Image (cartoon, rainbow, N blue to C red):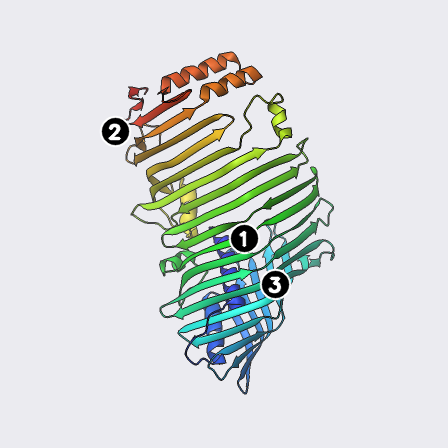
Amino acid sequence: MSLSSSRFYTLSCSTAVALFLGAPAAFADLTGADVWADWRGYMEGFGYGLTADEAVSGNTLTVSNVVMSLPLEGQAGTVGYTIPTLDFVTNADGTVNVVMAPQSDLTMQTKTETGEVVDIAASYDTANFQMVASGDPSALTYTYSADTMDITLDSVAMNGTTLPADAARFVMSVADIKGTTDITVADKRTYDQTMTSGAVTYDAAFVDPEGQGRFALKGGTQGMTFGGVGDLPADGQTTDIGALLAAGFDFSGTFGFLAGNMNLNFDGPDGAGTASTSSQGGNIGVAMGQEGLRYDVTQNGLDVNMLMPDVPLPISFKMQQSKFNLTMPMQKSDEEQDFAFGFKMGDFTMSDMIWGIFDPTGQLPRDPATIAIDLTGKAKVLFDFFDPAQAAALESSGAVPGELNALTLQNLVVDAVGARLSGKGDFVFDNTDLVSFGGIPKPEGAVDLELVGGNGLIDKLVAMGLLPEQQAMGARMMMGLFAVPGEGEDTLNSKIEFNDQGHILANGQRIQ
């Protein structure tokens, strides 16, 4: 996660806490002042500047003119959030009702890469928002719900000039929101959150004031879920993500989404186009802490249709399942740290129109294709990703950012057009030897590969005229050099080894 994206995460998390924290019933008395102190301490501890007016009448603490601001990374601007009123009503049973004004304001000022100042104003509206806090100041619990939550773009200004009302539009609506949050405050702030929603819709459009283009985007999903846990240092500051991680920041959560769709229309200097997608849902897993950063994304039943300006025919494809995962260490350490990378295009199919471009007679099998790779390994990180000074020194010196120590090919699958390549392997690397393999650490290990249907595919490509006979002969010679016959028809096996002497062997025969 980049520092800028971590800023977005910070804003999202803190806004979620401020607006939608929820929890089950607790068993100790709590006052409105306790809840407001908790909110204020959380926001200020997370780097927000905060001002507000406070007044008490009976059992109600009214906080008005609440203004929160958060500087963007690198003095690139600020994000602001204003709530007209918050009422914290202390109940006889020791719980506190939190009553928020139905409309509040969001603002952001930032600069483009060309130096233009952009001011964005939006409104945040809720219908039938309800929240109850309970517990005690060291163990707060919240429950919340709302019939709808809407974010609407009100205006966009560039260098002080407000764009016409029809030049920019954005509306997002979330229905039937319910959630709970448990918070424990000690040397760290520990939280456990769950949330569900009904339909989510969005509608965005932009027209270039200089007439260079436009786009319109609409879509939504039938519902969302979220579950996450995390630790925040009690005195954490987001201005230094590295220090925040060192102090014990930790987060893991999973966002789920149900079936949905998206439609895009655009027109620009290169021409007009459209794109539409639909899917049967999926999830996004995110984790960040001292052990590193992790993403895990899955989408099911993806269907894509596009018309692009530079492509003379419609692009249409489907995928039963797409997956992507990434695990990477973020902090400097003398110890080896785990990393991982993987992706999958499962049961991928294209339209007959696309097939017809290179296989008009249908000689190639058009069965669903799958491409997948799964890598894990160990490496040493030689600098802190979140330290700008170290990053600048690394860039100017040209030094390597880390050392690769081990790599495991857990799985490789390329299954398409009647052939299937699969493999697994394991390697370790000697970073003291950068000579044997031309500047990369010397590997030691082996990979086992199996190819089924390779010769049959070559025959088809030759018959189609896509592969000249001379090149086909060269390909068969290479397969004969690196592979041996396996079990089953048209099956080849290959074991490629890198030994401790710096030699490369194929099926026991030295080739380098």
For mark 3, what is the residue?
107
Q: Which mark is residue 257?
A: 1
Q: Which mark is residue 500?
A: 2
Can see residue 203? Answer: yes
Q: CA distance from mark 2 to mark 3?
A: 61 Å
How many discs appear? 3
Q: Residues within 10 Å of mark 2 (few under 14, many from 20)?
A: few
Q: CA distance from mark 1 to mark 2?
A: 49 Å
Q: Nearer the viewer, mark 1 or mark 3?
A: 1
Q: Are marks 2 and 3 in contact (CB under 8 Å)?
A: no
Q: Residues within 10 Å of mark 3 (few under 14, many from 20)?
A: some
Q: Quadrant of the C terminus?
A: top left
Q: Nearer the viewer, mark 1 or mark 2?
A: 1
Amino acid of disc 3: Thr
Lower position in the chain sequence, tag 1 or tag 2 = 1
Which residue occupies the extreme top position in the image? 470
Image spot of residue 419 (x, y percent): 47, 25
Helix, strand or loop under label 2: loop
* Rendered residue at 49%/84% (across/down): 92
